[in-house]
Amino acid sequence: MRELIVRSIVLLIAVTMLNTTTINTSHAGTNDNPLLADWEGPYGGVPPFDRVQIPLFKPALEAAIAERLTEIQKIAGDPAPPSFENTIVALERTGRTLDRVGTLYGVWGSTMASPEYQTVQREMAPRLAAAEDEITQNEALFKRIEAVYNSPEKAKLNPEQQRLVWVYYTQFVRAGARLSPEAKKRLSQINQQLAGLYTKFSQNVLAEENDQFIVLKSEDELAGLPQSLRDAAAAAAETKKQPGAWVIMNTRSSIDPFLTYSDRRDLREKAWRMFVNRGDNGDEHDNNAIITEILQLRAERAKLLGYPTHAHWRLENTMAKTPERAMELMEAVWKPAVARVHEEVADMQALADKEGAKIKIEPWDYRYYMEKVRKAKFDLDQNEIKPYLQLEKLREGIFWVAGELFNFNFTPVTNVPVAHPDIRVWEVTDKTTKKHIGLWYFDPYARAGKRSGAWMNAYRSQERVNGEITTIVSNNANFVKGKPGEPVLISWDDATTMFHEFGHALHGLNSNVTYPSLSGTAVPRDYVEFPSQLLEHWLSTPEVLQRFALHYQTGKPIPQDLVDKIKRSATFNQGFATVEYLSAALIDMKLHLAGDRKIDPDAFERETLAQLGMPKEIVMRHRTPQFLHVFSSDGYSAGYYSYLWSDVITADAFGAFTEGKGPYDKAVAERLRKYIFSVGNTVDPAEAYRAFRGRDPKIDALMQKRGFSKS
Ligand SMILES: [Zn+2]
C-alpha cells in the first residue's frame, strides 16, 4: 500500500539498511519551506536538490501529510454521489506535495544518509505508516470506492480506468478496509508492532556488518589476493583504525572476493562463518526471536484479513497469484539445479585432488575452486575482461541500445540541480520527432551515506491527469571513482547490472498512461524485474561489444576469442547461483506458508533444507537471521521468488528476438514497447505478455539459459 502515500518507487538489486545514530536535530518552520514548493525550472519542473537542508524534512513531511489527509477528507465527505471522477480520479490528484517531498526525502535516505538524516527517518517512518492506515481505514472513503467499483457505470469506463478502479478497490480491501472497527484497531497495532520489529531486525544485521571484521596482519595472510582487493582491504583498515593492517569487512562486497581469491583456507572458513552467522550469534543482535514474532504477527494479520497464510495474502495481486504456482516453478528448477551443483562439486573436487590439496570441498571452498575450474575449463580470467569495460563507454552503449530499440536520444543537461556534484543528468527525446520524453539522472559512485548495490528510482511518474507530465528517473550504483582523467573500469557482472538498472529506467521512460498509480514500473513485484533482466541480454550483442567494449589504453574492441570464451562459459556455475538463490526463496515461501505455529527459525531452516536435499557445499544466499529482503519490511516477504518468476518471462521474451531478425529486430522491439514497456500497470501482466508473445511464457528458455536439462 505504500504506493498510495508516496508514489516514488525504488527497485533494488541488493537491499542494505542504513546506519542509525542518535543526534539532536533543530527545528525549522513550515512557512516558506522550499521542499513544499512546486518544482520549478525546465521540463515541467525539476527536483530542487540544491534547496535541501535536513532540518527542513520533518516540517515538510508533516505539512505534506496533513495536506494529503485534508484532501482525503474532502473526497470522503463529498456530498455528491460517488463517481469515477469525484472519487478515483480525485484520489489520483491527491498527495502531490507528499510525492514531491517524499522524492527528496527518499533520495537523501538512499544516497546521502547522514546521522542527522537518520534521526529524522526514525521519527518519521512510523508517522508515514500511521497516515497510510488512516487513509485505508477511512470508512466513508472506502464506501465511495466500493460504490464506484460495484456501479453499473463502471462498465462504461475504458479498460485503463476500470483497472484503476480495481487497483484501488483491491488495495483498500487487502489493507483491511472491510474489517470491523475492533479488527481494524488490532490491524493497526500489528502494523505498528511489525514496523518496530523490522527496524530492529535491520539494525541488528547492520550492527554485525559494522562491528565484525577480520584483520590481516602479514603478507602471508594476504596470499592469493589480487592488488585491487589488497588496496580495498588497506583502505578498510584505515576506516577501522587498524593502521598498517588489512581489513576484510563483514559485507558481501568484501567477503565474496575474499572467498574467491584467498589461498588461506583457514581464513576463508573464518570469513565465511562470520558472514553467514550475521544475526545468529546468540548475543544482543540475535534476530531469531524477532523472526518468530514477525512470523506470528504476519500470520495473525493474514487471518484477520481472511487469508489462510501471509503468503496467500502477499501473492494475491501478483502474476503468480498463488503460493502454489510460485512453489511449482521453484520446484521445477530446484532439482536440475541441485543436480548441476553435484557436477560442479565433482569438477572442483577433481581439481583439488589433482593439486594435492587433500581436502573435501566445503562451503568456504566453493568460490575459490569455482574460479580455478573456470580458468581450467574456459581459459577465462575475469581480470582479462575488465580493461575493455569502461564505465563511460558502456553508458554510451546503453544509450545506443535505447536508440535502436525505442528511438530514444540522450543529451547531457547541466542547468538542473543535483544532490551531489558526481550526479549527471541527460534529457531523453524521441530521435525522429525531437519530442521531450523525460530526464535520466545518473549517480554512479560510492560515497559515505549511500546504500550499497545498484537501483533505479522514479522521481516523477509519467501521467496525464494534470496535463502532460513527463517522467524523471534515475540509475544509481556504487562504482569506485577513479583518479581524475582515468577511466573507471568495471567487471562483466557490473556491466550486466548497468544494463539491468537501465532496463528499469527504460520501463519508466517508455510509460504512456493516464493515471500516475498505473505508471511505468508500478507493476506487480514478480513482473517488474522482467524489463530489466531482459535488457541485460543486449550487453553481449556484437553490436554493443564492437562499438563500446573498447580497451582503455589501445581503444581496440574486445577480441572475438575473449567474447567467445565469455559466451562458452555463460552457463558455468549456474548450479551454484541458482541453488544459492532458490534455497533462500524456498525458505522464504515455506516460512510464510507455515501458518501461526510458533517457529524456531534455526530449526526450521535446518530441517527444511534437509528435506529439500540442499547440497551441503552451499549456504542460502541470505540465511533467515539476515534476510533483509524478507524481514526489514513486507516488501519481498513471500516474494523472493519474484526474480526467478521474472527470469522465466525474460528468457522466453528474448526468444521473440532470436526467433526473429535478432536483438535489433525493429518489429519485435516495437511490440515490446507497445505491449510491455509503455503500458505500466494498465493491463494485467499475463495479458500484456500474451499480446507481445502470442502465448504464455514457457520455462524452456530459462532452463536453456541456465544450462539445465528439463526433468
Ligand atoms: Zn531490478
Image: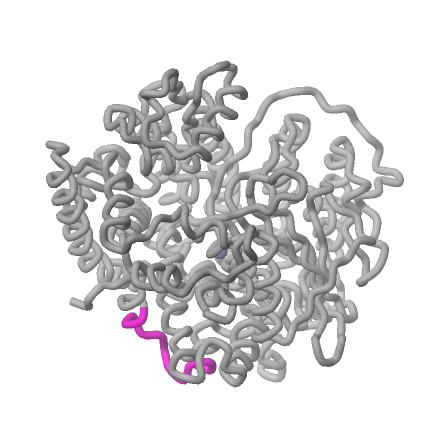
- Look at the image and give the residue range highlighted in magenta: 690-701
Above or below, comparing residue 79 to residue 314 in the picture: below
Residue occupying the point 20% across, 37% down: 606
Which image quadrant: the C terminus? bottom left
Residue 515, horizontal then vertical, whole percent: 66, 68
Q: Is residue 696 covered in magenta? A: yes
Residue at x 47%, y 37% (from the top left corner): 194
Is 45 colored magenta in this rendering? no
In this rendering, position of residue 600 left or right of residue 196: left
Residue sitting at the far right: 32
Residue 529 visible in this rendered orientation of the protein = no
Residue at position x 41%, y 68% in the image: 650
436 and 194: which is toward the camera: 436
| Residue 233 image position (x, y, % from top left) | 45, 27
Is residue 652 toward the left or the right of residue 88 in the image? Answer: left
Instruction: Please state if 521 lies on the left or on the right of 652 as rendered.
Output: right
On screen, residue 536 versus residue 325, left or right, reads: right
Could one spot residue 495 in this view of the protein? yes
In the figure, 155 relative to 88: above or below?
Answer: below
Vertical side of 286 occupied by 531: above or below: below
Q: Is residue 485 above or below residue 54?
A: below
Give x and y (percent) for residue 300.
38, 43
Q: Could you tell me which residue is drawn at 32 percent across and 22 percent down?
A: 281
